[in-house]
Amino acid sequence: MADREKLLDLAGSSFEIEDLLNYQSGAVVSQTLVDEEAVTVTVFAFDEGERLSEHTAPHDALLQVVDGTALVTVSGTEHEVAAGESIVLPANEPHAVEAASQFKMFLTMLR
């Protein structure tokens, strides 16, 4: 099913973000829910120990942990971010994400 179709299927319904995507052993999986000119919204599921290596992005992003715990490094400073917590990833600043345990995150990138 296309991402937009999945989002439309959820319209008007209550749902748990952590139920949108299943964990996969030894992997990081993602599903884009919105990909518009002004914003992208993506859900990620990380198996324990999996990571996104350090990189930069041209836009600010809000990372919201919805399950588990992540180690998020922003400009060389490591932050432990747990379910219910969020962190801003500033545009053009190096950042990396590692799963301290299995975790799921909701990433909103503002363009």
Image (cartoon, rainbow, N blue to C red):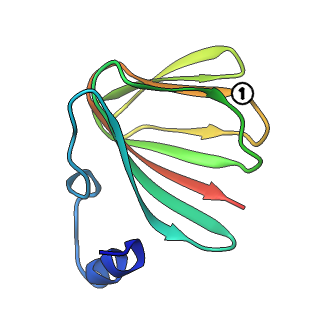
The x, y position of residue 111, in whole percent, is: 72, 61
Q: Residue at x 65, y 38 (%)?
A: 89
For the N terminus, the image quarter is bottom left
Q: Residue at x 28, y 77 (%)?
A: 10
94 is higher (above) or lower (below) than 86: above
In this rendering, the answer to whether 16 lies above or below 50 is below
Please provide percent x and percent y for residue 84: 35, 41
Residue 62 relative to residue 31: left or right: right
Nearer to me, 29 or 12: 29
Amino acid, disc 1: Pro
State the image quarter where residue 48 is shown: top left
Residue 77, by quadrant, is: top right
Q: Is residue 20 left or right of residue 43?
A: left
The residue drawn where x is 67% and y is 30% is 55
Q: Residues within 10 Å of mark 1 (few under 14, many from 20)?
A: some
96 left or right, relative to 17: right
**Residue occupied by mark 1:** 94
- Expressed as whole percent of the image width and height from the top left, the position of residue 14 reads 22, 73
Element marked by disc 1? loop
Where 24 sits versus 31, above or below? Answer: above
Residue at 72% in and 35% down: 56
Q: How many marks?
A: 1
Query: Is residue 72 found left or right of 8 in the rendered image?
Result: right
